[in-house]
Structure formats: C-alpha cells, structure tokens
Amino acid sequence: MADSSADRLAVIHRHLTKDSGDKVAPKIPSSIPKKRQELLRWNGWGYEDSGFVLNNLGTEQHPKYVFTFSGSRYEIASADLPHFYDWACTTIGVHPEKKKDPQGEPSYPEPILNEGFVNGLKNTSMTFSFEGMDRLFRAHGHTLHDIALLRGGQFLRIPDVVVWPECHSHVEELVALAFKYNVAVVPIGGGTNVTGAVDCKRDEQRMIVSLDTSQMNQILWIDDGNLVAHVESGIIGKDLEDRLQKRGYTTGHEPDSYEFSSLGGWVATRASGMKKNRYGNIEDLVVALRAVTPSGEWRSSGTYPRVSTGPDMNHVMIGSEGTLGVITEVTIKIRPIPPLRKYASFVFPDFDCGVKFMRQVARDRCQPASLRLMDNQQFQFGQALRPSKGPFGLIVDGLKNFYLTRLKGLDINKICVATIVMEGTIKEVAVQEEKLNTIGLEFQGIPAGEHNGKRGYQLTFAIAYIRDIGLNYGVVAESFETSVPWDRVVNVVNNTKSRLEKECADRKFSHSFISARVTQVYDAGACIYFYFAFNYGTMSMLQAVEVYEELEIIARNEIMASGGSLSHHHGVGKIRKKWLPSILTSNAINVLHSIKNTVDPQNIMAAGNLVFD
C-alpha cells in the first residue's frame, strides 16, 4: 500500500533532524559569548584586544611614530610596521595631533514592553536580557554609519529585549509568542552585515525582539557517505570550520568575516567566500534548510542533490535577509580537507594586464581556490603594511633573480598584484600551478613567490580593523562591492574611481583614497571590491558620514550605469533597497510581497529589508 502524505513528511522530517550515531558532541559553547562585549569591541570591528595602534617610540620633542597591531591573534600582530605611518600621513592625512577619541558608553533608549509577551517569555526556558549593552550590541551591523553612531552619536531605536533560543523548537515557541502578541522580531547571527540589515526602524511602535541565534551552534550530525553536515544556523564560521576539521572536513566557505559571521547569516544574505572557486558560494553549498515563519515551519523536501519540482523553495529563504522567517538549521555540503594548500602570486605591469590574466584563467576554467587581483593603490597600501624594510619589501624578496631585470622595466606606480591559493592533491596543485604560470607569463606576469600570496591572503582578516584607526584620526572609510561581466570590469573600475576622484576634488578634500580589487572570478564575470576613504578635515565625524553616504550613492549609480550589479554578496538590507524598483520588475516585487503576506501577514519579521517596510 502506498505511503500516506503524512508518512512521507514524517520520513523527510526524520532525515532533516535525524539524531544518528554520528552526532559530533554534546552542547559545545560558541567562541563568541552571549555577552559579546566581554570579547568583542563594542564600538568597532573585531576582538577588543586586536587592532592598529600608533605609538611614539621617540620623545615628545623628537617623536618617532610607528604603527603596530595589538594582540596575538593575527600574523601581523606585535611587529612594528615602519612604513605604514608614512603611507597614512601622505595618502590619507593621518597626524597624531589630530587624534579624535570616541565617546564612552552611551545612554540607551528605554525599552518598549509588551506585558503579555514578557510574561509569556518568562514562562519559557529561554534566556533573555533587557540590559542596555546587550541590546545595543544587536542594534547594528558594521556600516560606517553604525560605527560612527557608536563612537559619537546615539541610536534612537534599539531592540527592547535580546532572546537566546537554543534550538529549532525554541524559535518556534518564540515566534509563536511574538505572533500572538504582535511583537516585532529581528533575527541576528554574527552581526557583521554592512547593509543596515539589523538596524531597528525608528518608527516601529511595537516591542522589538532581537532573536540572537548564537546559542544554536551545534553540528547535529555528519553524513560521511554523502558528505553533508546538518548544522544549527547560529554557529560562527570559524567554529564550524574548527569542529569540522577535527573530523577531517571543511565547508571551504571562508568570507572575510568568518571569524564572527554565522552560517544562518551567510544563507540569509547569499554570501560568498574567498575560496568559492573550489567550493562554491553559499547557495551552491546549501542542500536543505529548516526555518520558522510566523505561519509555521518552512523546510526543504529532503536532502537531495538536485530536484526538478518547480521553483526551488530553498531560494525563497536564501537571501531573504530576515524578512520571512528565522533560518534554524542547514544541511550543507562538506569536503575532505585537501592534502595540500599552496600559495602563489604574480606581479603585472598594470591593471589591464592583470584583468586579462584573470579572464583567461576563468575562460580556461583553471581557477584556483582563491584568485584575487589588487590594483596599484592596494598594492601600495599592502606594501605599507610590510614589517620588513627596503623600497619594495616582500614583493622583491619573493622574485627570483632571473626576473629582476624585468622588474626594473616596470612602473612601481602602475603595477598590480594577483594573490593565489591552490588546494588539492599534490598532482592537482602541480597542474594548477603549471597552468597559472603559463597564463601569467602570457600576460607579462612575473611570479612573485609563495610568501607574498600567503601574506596577501591572511592580511584580509587584519585589514578589517583599518577603519577604526582611521576614525581615530579624522578619516572615514568603507568598502562596497559589485559583480560585473568580464567586458565591463576595467570600465567599471576606471569610471567609478574617476568619478569619486572628481567628487573629492570638487569638495576640496585634502586627502582621499580609492582602490579596487577583483576578488572572485566566474565564467561570465567577476566580483569587484572598492575601498574608499577621505580625510574629513574640519567636519564633524557625523557630518563626514553623511557626505560619505552621498558619495557612495554616486559611486553606486556610476557602477550600475557602467554595467555593474547592485550587490554581489553583501546583500540589500536597508541602504540599497532604494535601487530595487529599478532592477526588479513590478511583477517580481509583487511576487515578493505575495510571499511575505502568505508567511508573515502581520509583519512579525520586521527587519524591513529588501522591498519590505
């Protein structure tokens, strides 16, 4: 006799939530504590004990300023950076006497309380907090605007309570309670978004719950045969990798923020990692997921490698940015740890040659795990961060003597650098290396050594701390990204940089910095990251942030007019939603609203991202 529909759903449920003998371990604490302020910087990026510091190694009469990087978590830490101070003074106008200290801990808005909800919450087993710093920590992401408010302003609306569910059923209970009492819910994972995605809407009159997924951080099971793992969504990327690697596996998903960002956040924003060439973007890695919406559970039909059953319902949740429900569990592809990782780098005469190299690598489909191209401005910046001495530092150290005469013919103010990470078996890596060397030489590339490739890759994590030290000395800085067809890459970079340079000149900024790098490559195009900073002189920091936001809008319009997308992987959030009506048809927007009205008719999931209010 055929199985009933209920029987089939029960089988699917058991597969998605199975408690097999492969369960990895009992409850393991997150590396990020509930009280994030005990470990992380409350008004800036990253760990409290890490960051750039400007020291005077001389005397008050005869100062000698040198930057260092504090702590011991990163390879750059504890070493003097003798060239960085000169670069910072010359390029962005940093001067010790202009230091601007951030404000102390701010005051907090009084919470709006829904008595029925609070009483119901007290009757659950979930922990929660009304403390000001706990609420503030979850009121923002890491846009320039967010950090500026923390350092010198005031958030007018923050969550009224933080709740830490510890499993899928807890989320069901919490969302049902919010639905019953018409309370707004804003999910948060690592809080690393740069789109205003978790910022509270100022006009929200309902009680706002920050649903912190960080305590849902377990690997529920690993399927060695099918190479998938079923994982709770709040796990931090670094924790996920550390635990999987103890079993001999990796997801290979390594965004710049993976020390602090969560699996659920990756899924909710359609994230991308530095090694996507080998392992895929997050949408390529997700096999199945579970979520809780105000109308009930949302889950995949099974852990199948692929299905042809109409539109993929996983993709309704992937990229939904907290507007439809709370992603609670994800079945994700894993791979055995490759036996070999090898780094490499190339120097090219100019950016055009570097882009042609990247294009040919993609055309030949021989992309290594990571392949990134820095323009000359980023090359100069990277050289300023070298601990070693000498006019060309580590780049020259990595060049073989055979190429030194060729290097003399290069213009140091035009060259760009590609950094490479190769992973696989010894044979696979050897084949990759041979192909890349052949293509590199074809486009006038000079092999620049393994050490430079490794250093360039690892500097990514430390560079995230740059913005904080800039704000200390009157410099605002931010990054933004896009995806571009190959035939538009150079134009998008040149047009955007030229437009920003003109805007800075028109505004008579004393110093500004605009650079670009190509970070991910595809058959049909690439991802471009822009880095933009300016010295704001006599303006206040908050005034400078307003000017920056005007300039980023101008830059985004230039990017899109030149052939770039609205976003490659940061997402939309609130800061980019103004452009959605110009890139989505009215029918598409109506479909999104229809989904929202079906799963969340009361707008309980009130993040206000994408096209939703």
Image (cartoon, grey):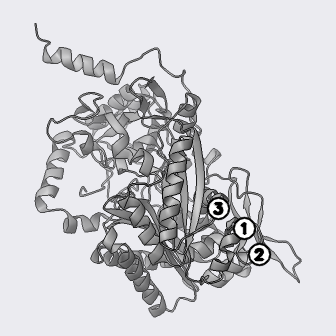
Judged from the image, the secondary structure of the residue bearing numbered disc 3 is loop
Q: Callout 3, which amino acid?
A: Gly
Q: Nearer the viewer, mark 1 or mark 2?
A: 1
- Looking at the image, residue 590 sits to the left or right of residue 279; the answer is left
Q: Which residue is mark 2?
A: 390
How far is the residue under mark 2 from the one under mark 3? 17 Å
Question: Residue 510, position in %: x, y?
Answer: 57, 89
- Looking at the image, residue 260 sits to the left or right of residue 74; the answer is left
Question: Residue 126, position in %: x, y?
Answer: 45, 29
The image quarter containing residue 197 is bottom left
Q: Callout 1, which amino acid?
A: Asp
Q: Are marks 3 and 1 in contact (CB under 8 Å)?
A: yes
Residue 78 visible from this viewpoint: yes
How far is the residue under mark 1 from the one under mark 2? 10 Å
Q: Which residue is mark 1?
A: 397
Between residue 143 and residue 514, name the one nearer to us: 514
How far is the residue under mark 3 from the one under mark 1? 8 Å
Residue 187 visible from this viewpoint: no
Q: Earlier in the sequence, mark 2 or mark 3?
A: 2
Relative vertical location of residue 168 with respect to residue 316 in this rendering, above or below: above
Judged from the image, the secondary structure of the residue bearing numbered disc 1 is helix
Q: Which residue is mark 3?
A: 449
Residue at left 42%, top 85%?
Answer: 498
Residue at left 27%, top 27%?
Answer: 302
Judged from the image, the secondary structure of the residue bearing numbered disc 2 is loop
Q: Callout 2 environment at 10 Å: few (<14), some (14 to 19), or many (20+)?
A: few
Total labels drawn: 3
Residue at left 14%, top 62%?
Answer: 585
Q: Earlier in the sequence, mark 1 or mark 2?
A: 2
Q: Are marks 2 and 3 in contact (CB under 8 Å)?
A: no
Q: Are marks 1 and 2 in contact (CB under 8 Å)?
A: yes
